Image (cartoon, grey):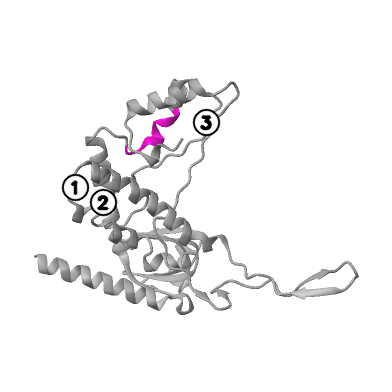
Amino acid sequence: LNPASSVVNGDEYDLCLRECHRCLKPGGYLEYSLLDAEVLRPGRHAQALSVEFAFNLKTRGYDPCASKSFIPRLRKAGFSQIKRAHLVLPMADATPKWTDSGKVGSHSAGVGKFVLANGEVKTYEPAYTGSTADVKAITGVVGSWAWEKWMLKLQMEMGKDGERLLEGVATALEEGGNFFKTLVDHEVTVELKNDISIRGTLKSVDQFLNIKLDDISVVEEIRWPHLSSVKNVFIRGSVVRYVHLPGQAVDTALLEDATRREAAQAAAKARQG
């Protein structure tokens, strides 16, 4: 059962679940997946689009956050021993950097060896390995496709003009692959407007430059001894003067692309004004 694959309202959920419960043999089980319209930690474009999407779903009698009410619906239909797991998929991600020798940042395990039946030892070059971070580009496609497909179905049902279908979705998805997110887990230095400079591991950053740092240290700690015991901080974007980035970790192509896109959006707003 995949309720996210079709837009259904609450009454149809209950009828569907009761019928599933009736058809299952004793000891049988039901697997299901749900998709919420809400975008977590969105950029400004994605936030506006997400709010509009949820509002349109509600006005047409659909549930934009089905996962919040689904457990009670299952119990009401007669199901027991219910288990659930939450999965958060990125809506977009920066394009992985691949070279002829593998992904940048990946490494080979060295030379592998195996022994033949006659005792002869053979060597081979193992595959390049990376980390689970390498799959973000693929999961980003999956998350984006599911959300976009749901929105398209609703807009077609609403009779939206064909040329305006999924308007603004591309811009919202591109925000998910913004430049600063490629620097997560790298060490950065944030200089504040009160002249304090804090060095730490970047854990999160949003479109307003609100920054979370772990394992921090204060530059010129002798001037700010009261901060010596602090390990993790959240810094509001309004107090940030500069962010000093590690040169080797900066994706200049992505930075240039983000700058051009921001300039184009600003120019479009100026023309409209």
Q: Helix, strand or loop at disc 3?
A: loop
Residue 127 picture location, percent across and down: 65, 70
Q: Distance between the residues labelled 3 and 2?
A: 33 Å
- Looking at the image, is 59 positioned above or below residue 230? above
**First reached walking from the N terminus: tag 3 or tag 2:** 3
The part of the chain drawn in magenta is 64-71
Residue situated in front as seen by the camera: 191 or 10: 10
Residue 116 picture location, percent across and down: 85, 69
Identify the residue under disc 2: 49
- Looking at the image, is 145 positioned above or below residue 268? above
Q: In which quarter of the image is the C terminus?
A: bottom left
Main SS category, magenta section: helix
The residue lying at 32 percent from left, 35 percent from top is 63
Badge 1 amino acid: Lys
Badge 3 amino acid: Leu
Query: What numbered label is drawn on residue 30?
Result: 3
Q: Helix, strand or loop at disc 2?
A: helix
- Looking at the image, is 158 positioned above or below residue 240? above
Residue 50 picture location, percent across and down: 29, 48
Identify the residue under disc 1: 160
Toward which corner of the image does residue 245 lie, by quadrant?
bottom left
The residue lying at 36 percent from left, 53 percent from top is 41
